[in-house]
Image (spheres, rainbow, N blue to C red):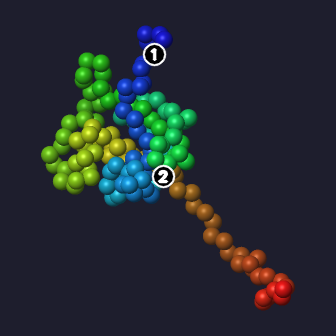
């Protein structure tokens, strides 16, 4: 391997399930439901990491171990080789102001990034709510033919 290629095996693993509001804690969600977002994708998480100026790598071919239908994960590097943070706003230290036990666990394990990404994903440009036109024609639902039980 080349010396300039980063070793992403030591980077933090971030599955979209960790911040998915549709999942339970038993299914893999790691932040509280009120702060989680609905069905995040790896691309959205990657865009949030680039917003925070954190190096990241998207691995599309990987699946979440608890649910193999959840495809993709993001690897993120929080600290430089000398131990300094890439973004001081995303730290891996404890925050004494958090009292919720689920959020406290997320902070204590160095997962402050999850909370920050979950705040940004709903505002992602790819999530712009498209206005669907209201269907005014309901005449297409009428059936023709006999109704009732079939005889054997």
Between 126 and 109, the residue placed more toward the observer is 109
SS at mark 1 in the image: loop
- Above or below residue 29? Residue 73 is above
* Spatial separation of the CA atoms under disc 2 and disc 1: 31 Å
Task: Please indicate, yes or no, whether residue 27 appears anywhere in the rendered image.
Answer: yes
Farthest-out residue, front:
152
Would you identify the image quadrant in which residue 88 lies?
Answer: top left
**Is 37 on the left or on the right of 83, as rendered?**
right
Residue 5: image tag: 1
Between 151 and 132, the residue placed more toward the observer is 151
Q: Of callouts 2 and 1, which one flags the residue occurring earlier in the amino acid sequence?
A: 1
Task: Please indicate, yes or no, whether residue 89 appears anywhere in the rendered image.
Answer: no
Pinpoint residue 28: horizontal percent, then vertical percent.
Answer: 40, 50
Q: Residue at x 37, y 25 (%)?
A: 10
Pinpoint residue 51: horizontal percent, then vertical percent.
Answer: 39, 35
Pinpoint residue 8: horizontal percent, then vertical percent.
Answer: 42, 24
Q: Are marks 2 and 1 in contact (CB under 8 Å)?
A: no
The C terminus lies in quadrant:
bottom right
Q: Residue at x 45, y 58 (%)?
A: 22
Q: Residue at x 32, y 30 (%)?
A: 78
Pinpoint residue 45: horizontal percent, then vertical percent.
Answer: 44, 40
SS at mark 2 in the image: loop
Residue 124: image tag: none
Q: Residue at x 39, y 57 (%)?
A: 24
- Above or below residue 135? Residue 99 is above
- Residue on which the image places disc 2: 39
Crowd rating for badge 1 (residues with CA inside 10 Å; few <14, some 14–19, many 20+): few
């Amino acid at each position: 391997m080349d010396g300039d290629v980063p070793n992403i095996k030591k980077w933090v693993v971030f599955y979209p399930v960790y911040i998915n509001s549709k999942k339970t804690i038993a299914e893999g969600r790691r932040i509280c439901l009120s702060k989680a977002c609905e069905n995040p994708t790896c691309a959205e998480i990657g865009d949030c990491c680039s917003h925070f100026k954190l190096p990241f790598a998207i691995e599309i071919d990987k699946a979440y171990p608890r649910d193999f239908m959840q495809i993709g994960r993001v690897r993120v590097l929080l600290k430089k080789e000398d131990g300094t943070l890439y973004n001081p706003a995303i730290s891996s230290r404890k925050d004494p102001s958090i009292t919720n036990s689920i959020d406290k666990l997320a902070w204590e394990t160095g997962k402050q990034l999850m909370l920050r990404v979950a705040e940004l994903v709903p505002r992602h440009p790819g999530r712009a709510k498209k206005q669907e036109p209201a269907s005014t024609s309901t005449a297409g639902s009428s059936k023709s033919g006999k109704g009732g039980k079939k005889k054997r």
